[in-house]
Image: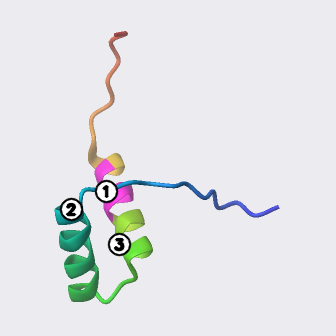
Amino acid sequence: MDADKRISLRLPADLHKRLVEQARRDRRSLNSEIIHLLEAATASAPRDTESP
């Protein structure tokens, strides 16, 4: 079984454009760029210990 999960994601057109441009600058695919950004954001994000 594949460890990767597929999702369908809708992005605003302007955000998609910025992500494509950033991926090109970083020499990554769009998918790899999004994964990189999500990993970086979740690694440094403080944990919310309070219940909603």
Confirm or deny contact between disc 2 and disc 1 (CB under 8 A).
Answer: yes
Q: Name the residue under label 2.
A: 15
Residue plotted at (60% across, 58% down): 6
Q: In which quarter of the image is the N terminus?
A: bottom right
Q: Nearer the viewer, residue 10 or 7?
A: 10
Q: Residues within 10 Å of mark 1 (few under 14, many from 20)?
A: few
Separation (CA) of disc 3 from disc 1:
14 Å
> Where's residue 25, x and y in %?
21, 87
Instruction: Of the two numbered discs 3 and 1 on the same chain, state the one appearing first in sequence.
Output: 1
Residue plotted at (42% across, 64% down): 35
Residue 11 got which mark?
1
Q: Residues within 10 Å of mark 3 (few under 14, many from 20)?
A: some
Q: Residues within 10 Å of mark 2 (few under 14, many from 20)?
A: few
Q: Which of 49 and 29 is in front in this view?
A: 29
Q: Give the range drawn in magenta.
A: 37-41
User: For numbered disc 2, what is the local secondary structure?
Assistant: helix
Q: In which quarter of the image is the C terminus?
A: top left
Single out the residue that lies furthest toward the top: 51
Tag 2: amino acid: Leu
Q: Locate residue 16 relative to residue 2 in the image: left or right.
A: left
Residue plotted at (28% across, 47% down): 44
Confirm or deny contact between disc 3 and disc 1 (CB under 8 A).
Answer: no
Image height of 40 relative to 30, above or below: above
Residue 33 got which mark?
3
User: For numbered disc 1, what is the local secondary structure?
Assistant: loop
